[in-house]
């Protein structure tokens, strides 16, 4: 589950991570009130107005702007709120901005220069250990840094038995070229950040940039936080932060009825039971010259109603040119799935895309008979290869 920047910062701050302070607002008037409050609490005279959407690259799309007066806070907020923000991480249509974060200006003048760093915490799947990735090139796309200057990216792996050790936090600060007060502040920052990552059951933290201010404070100016969905039952307060407006509407609908659905960019809809068989079915579609339009696992309790719901969700995608139903009946009975296919076809009226159904396992013979005797335009197959051939035929 992804969090907005302001939510991620609140989480980080609760574990002692220093953040750029801010107040979220959903109208220009509330944005001005937030700016006034920040001025009273922090003494800031300038403010940064930040669009709150689940996407990076907001500044490039015009979603992050500096305001040097309260009038500018209001006008900039008015421009950003309601806009369809297009960034490298959104679709071509962009994402609607429903909230802005009004933050203090932390780039104030002082005795020394400011510096921006990149720091993230994530799992290194190759080693099975958590890893801190960091760079002196903060404020830039880390992919660009990795491609052009890979020697400027450092990593520090953490032994899960020992946790982050003091010398490792100090090593991060040293490799970032810090000394004195800034060195000590960065050491504390890294330690607090890793603690937050572990205790919040997150799957990724990305802070870009981490700022060394002109008076040697270390502050998270941005935050991208992803919580592990499997751990949300332990964090009801985090689960309440979910903003469904930022998520795929079809995926949200599927999740609400207990279906495991992931929207993809292809042209063949998939309805399968079991994640492993679903992945194999997606490979089958690729080998047949098609592209999977979704991942849909109806689970081991698929019945007629559940199957019909799956069909309705798949057919909301206008790119779907065919549907492949591939069920192995172990726990689930194939005849119940077949009845769901028949019911869906009849209840939904005119289904214009071809449907290929492969049912194997418990009551597979009865299921095949049920479909063939229904009189509906449904292609029933038995073998995996036969299903692949039929997919290729209907796409030709």
Image (tube, rainbow, N blue to C red):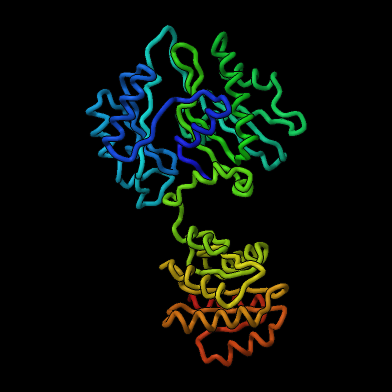
Q: Nearer the viewer, residue 205 or 89?
A: 205
Horizontal relation, residue 185 to residue 87: left or right: right
Residue 155 sits above or below residue 275 on the image: above
Task: Identify the residue at image location x=37%, y=22%.
Answer: 105
The percent position of residue 52, horizontal first and vertical second, equals 39, 40
Residue 60 visible in the picture: no
The percent position of residue 73, horizontal first and vertical second, equals 27, 30
Residue 173 sits above or below residue 238 on the image: above
Horizontal relation, residue 154 to residue 20: left or right: right
Task: Identify the residue at image location x=47%, y=72%.
Answer: 312
Task: Identify the residue at image location x=42%, y=82%.
Answer: 349
Task: Identify the residue at image location x=64%, y=83%.
Answer: 335
Q: Nearer the viewer, residue 321 or 28?
A: 28
Horizontal relation, residue 317 to residue 378: left or right: left
The percent position of residue 284, horizontal first and vertical second, equals 61, 68
**Count of numbered marks:** 0
Q: Quadrant of residue 189?
A: top right
Residue 386 sits above or below residue 264 on the image: below
Residue 103 visible in the picture: yes
Hey, which residue is sitting farthest right in the picture? Answer: 161
The percent position of residue 279, horizontal first and vertical second, equals 63, 62
């Amino acid at each position: 589950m992804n969090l907005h920047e302001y939510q991620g910062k609140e989480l980080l701050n609760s574990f002692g991570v220093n953040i750029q302070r801010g107040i979220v607002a959903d109208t220009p008037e509330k944005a001005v009130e937030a700016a006034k409050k920040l001025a009273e609490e922090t003494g800031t005279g300038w403010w940064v107005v930040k669009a709150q959407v689940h996407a990076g690259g907001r500044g490039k799309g015009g979603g992050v702007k500096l305001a040097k007066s309260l009038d500018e806070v209001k006008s900039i907020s008015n421009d950003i709120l309601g806009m369809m923000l297009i960034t490298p991480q959104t679709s071509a249509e962009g994402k609607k901005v429903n909230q802005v974060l009004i933050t203090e200006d932390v780039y104030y003048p002082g005795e020394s220069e400011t510096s921006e760093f990149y720091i993230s915490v994530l799992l290194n799947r190759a080693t099975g250990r958590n890893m801190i990735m960091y760079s002196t090139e903060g404020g830039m796309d880390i992919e660009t840094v990795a491609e052009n200057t890979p020697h400027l990216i450092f990593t520090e792996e953490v032994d899960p038995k020992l946790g982050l050790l003091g010398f490792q936090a100090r090593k991060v600060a040293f490799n970032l070229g810090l000394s004195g007060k800034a060195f000590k502040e960065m050491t504390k920052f890294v330690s607090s950040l890793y603690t937050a990552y572990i205790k919040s059951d997150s799957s990724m933290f990305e802070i870009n940039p981490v700022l060394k201010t002109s008076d040697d404070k270390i502050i998270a100016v941005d935050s991208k936080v992803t919580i592990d969905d499997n751990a949300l039952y332990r964090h009801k307060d985090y689960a309440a932060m979910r903003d469904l407006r930022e998520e795929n509407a079809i995926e949200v609908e599927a999740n609400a009825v207990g279906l495991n659905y992931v929207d993809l960019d292809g042209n063949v809809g998939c309805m399968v039971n079991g994640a492993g068989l679903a992945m194999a079915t997606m490979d089958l579609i690729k080998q047949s010259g098609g592209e999977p339009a979704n991942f849909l696992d109806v689970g081991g309790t698929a019945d007629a109603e559940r199957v019909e719901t799956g069909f309705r969700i798949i057919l909301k995608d206008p790119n779907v040119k065919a549907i492949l139903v591939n069920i192995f009946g172990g726990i689930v009975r194939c005849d119940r799935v077949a009845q769901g296919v028949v019911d869906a076809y009849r209840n939904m009226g005119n289904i214009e895309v071809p449907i290929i159904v492969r049912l194997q396992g418990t009551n597979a013979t009865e299921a095949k008979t049920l479909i063939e005797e229904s009189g509906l335009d449904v292609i029933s197959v038995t073998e995996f290869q036969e299903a692949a051939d039929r997919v290729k035929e209907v796409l030709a």
